[in-house]
Amino acid sequence: MRVITLTCSDCGTVVSANELESNRVMKCPGLDCEAVLRFADLPESDREHFVAHREQYRL
């Protein structure tokens, strides 16, 4: 299993791929940050790996 995350370019908050995939588009959870994060912001290879191995990433 790989750890797949996205770092907000505005505030540096790290969000997991499973959160991004379940919401597809979400406001950054960082304090006072208004950035919008998208599953599509992850590199294509990370998105493909996550979708192909979704069962490994369930909480």
Image: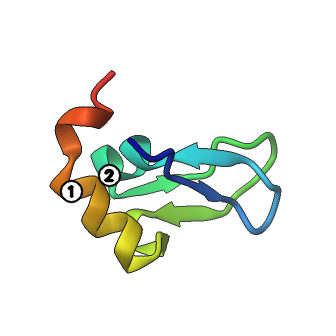
Disc 1 element: helix
Quarter occupied by the C terminus: top left
- Give the answer, above or below, for where 34 lies relative to 57: below
Disc 2 element: helix
Which mark is nearer the camera, 2 or 1?
Answer: 1
Could you say which disc has been placed on residue 33 in the image? none
Please tell me how crowded label 2 is: few (under 14), some (14-19), or many (20+) other residues with Cα within 10 Å. Answer: some
Q: Residue at x 33, y 58 (%)?
A: 24
Q: How many marks?
A: 2
The residue lying toward the viewer, choosing from 47 and 40, is 47
| 50 left or right of 54 in image | right
Q: Residue at x 50, y 45 (%)?
A: 3
| 21 left or right of 52 in image | right
Query: Within the image, what quadrant is residue 12 found in?
Result: bottom right
Looking at marks 2 and 1 on the same chain, the residue that comes earlier in the sequence is marked by 2
Query: Within the image, what quadrant is residue 47 found in?
Result: bottom left
For badge 1, the amino acid type reads Val
Q: Residue furthest bottom?
A: 44
Q: Which residue is mark 2?
A: 21
The residue lying toward the viewer, choosing from 32 and 4, is 4
Q: Residue at x 74, y 48 (%)?
A: 13
Looking at the picture, the colour scheme in use is: rainbow
**Looking at the picture, how far across and down is residue 42, in whole percent?**
47, 69
The residue lying toward the viewer, choosing from 34 and 52, is 52
**Looking at the picture, how far across and down is residue 15, in whole percent?**
58, 46
Q: Residue at x 21, y 48 (%)?
A: 53
- Answer yes or no: do the residues labelled 2 and 1 have beta carbons within 8 Å? yes
| 11 left or right of 14 in image | right
**Looking at the picture, how far across and down is residue 20, in whole percent?**
41, 51
Quarter occupied by the N terminus: top left
Q: Which residue is mark 1?
A: 51
